Image: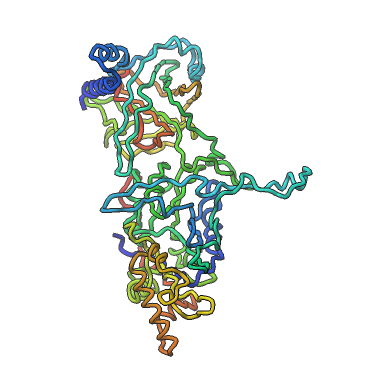
Amino acid sequence: MKTTSIPLLAAAIVLLVSSTFVASVDAQQKLAKTAVPDRTGLSLHASDATASAQTLRNPMAPDWTRIPSQRIALNRTPPLYDTEVPAALEIPYVDVRLARAEGKLIVQMIWRDATQDTAQIATLPGTPTEGRPHKELTEATDRFFDSAAVMHPQHAPAEDVWPSLQMGDPGQPVTIYFWNSARGAARMQAEGRGTTKRTGESFPCQATYLDGAWNLAMELDGIPSGMPLAFAIWNGSQQDRDGRKYFTTWLKLE
Amino acid sequence: MSRHQYAMVMDLNKCLGCQTCTIACKKLWTDRDGTQHMYWNNVETRPGIGYPRQWDQVGGGWKDGQLQPSKQPTLDDYGAPWEFDYEQRLFEGKKKPVMSSPDPISGPNWDEDVGALNGDDNFYFYLPRICNHCTNPACLAACPRQAIYKREEDGIVVLDQERCEGYRYCIAACPYKKIYFNEITGKSEKCIFCYPRLEKGQVNACAAQCPGRLRFVGLLDDPNSAVHKLVHLYKVALPLFPEKGTLPNVFYVPPFNPPKRANYGKSILEDPRLPLEYLLYLFGPEVKTIVVRLEAELKSAQNGTPSELLQLLIGRDAETRYQIRPQLVQIQPRIGGHS
């Protein structure tokens, strides 16, 4: 996959979506200028933070405001299965800040989501069950939860040949930092679609839902410059899980 | 196609609705956190809403080689678990009777013995259900993670807890709604046909505990098995909703001769207590042929002709009903998919 083709495609999709809401060419051009994200997906800048990693783990920490925000267009995966109903583009973009602190790369993601889809899971695996009644079920049986992820190749890829956005390729594994609003954070690995595997490890991650938006901070390993990153968001109320989600293209970390 | 296929036949003329099978299964397999609503084996009154509620009305399965849309049951469709306020009544001075909370609105066999009217007469029967361990499982096809597989050695359909990510496409795809989501583990679960028991030569717990002796278990491809004889030799057992296209390996002998008051001995074709239309709904058009066949066999036996079929259906002992063949089944490590 060429590094330039997908970002251009993403920009084209944004323009196309924008064009459905305006009547005149002038208005369309004006809207395109304002609606197209500051960065259409070519690269991302990580700033050296003055605050500690501990501080930045809080997505609401005031120190985040010193880091420039970068708006990234989100794409919607097409229906993957015969029985799947196409989903609307309810979340058009995510605002990302990247900070380097104490050898870590800390990611803040903020996106608007009208519904907070989460639940208090009665108990998590590993909790002793002896001597107490079974935990009651919540309403989670048929619900899906808001989630987000950051993905990067495990090894620095060759120039212009990045792994597939669909969870990497055989021989080109990716690491996925996955957060689920009800189940917490999990680090995963994959080598292609359908191969995602939990490593059993977690990572520092905090999220706050406030005024119709998720504010999320993830502490990643110190991913070096030049490495591509990709972001994904799952909207629980849209039955999102699996490949049914919002995604960005690969973005080169500067 | 698996090399062998375990199957079960249930004779609906013999089911008492006692739920002993349900409890046997529950105590053995789903006595854990997150499994309150899971009945890998359930017995429901028919006609009725079933469990989960209206499972037979929401689609799934196959049509023209394509998976059909469906929906996931909600917690209300299973019936939210409720508690009783014993503490308030016994220790806190509450005067009113013990009440349940939340107010129950549904549950397993919620409409027990309600049935329906056939003319002026009420009728119902019981329908025990487990996973059908289908030959063409919709759940398996719907799982994008290949977490569900059909065991090569015996055709049992199992769900790999390591690979499952709780996407629940399988629950929607199964037209029988026999896969359940465990929200505590975040993974789906289903009936495993008691394969650990079968591998030791013991029959499924639901069958072993059945006081009505209505279950027959064996390899469908074993010509000496009761299941083979009932399905392929005597042809008196049918799968549930065959039009769903999943090719179930659980079969039912339809209720063909329920005695009607003051009219004992007449079949549902002559003076139906149980309308044939309802059996056609459940089992498809072939059920009429089977009723005719069973009626003829019954009349022949009543006239003194020995009937191996009826003796088999009576199933006096375990040796008659179960032909478990662990020696035929070479346990294979799982092949393919991702570890």
- Tell me where residue B90 appears, x and y as whole percent: 76, 48
**Above or below: residue A147 compared with residue B275:** above
The quadrant the N terminus of chain A occupies is: top left
- Tell me where residue A235 appears, x and y as whole percent: 41, 31
| Residue visible at 36% across and 51% down in the picture | B60
The quadrant the C terminus of chain A occupies is: top left
Observer-nearest of A84 and A161: A84
Q: Say whether residue B208 is visible.
A: no
Residue B288 as seen in the image, left or right of residue B109 = left
Among all residues in the image, which is located at the extreme bottom? B304
| Residue visible at 79% across and 44% down in the picture | B93
**Above or below: residue B283 compared with residue A216:** below
- Tell me where residue A15 appears, x and y as whole percent: 26, 20
**Above or below: residue B60 compared with residue B320:** above
Picture quadrant where residue B222 is located = bottom left
Observer-nearest of B22 and B16: B16
Residue A193 as seen in the image, left or right of residue B129 = left
- Tell me where residue A25 appears, x and y as whole percent: 23, 14
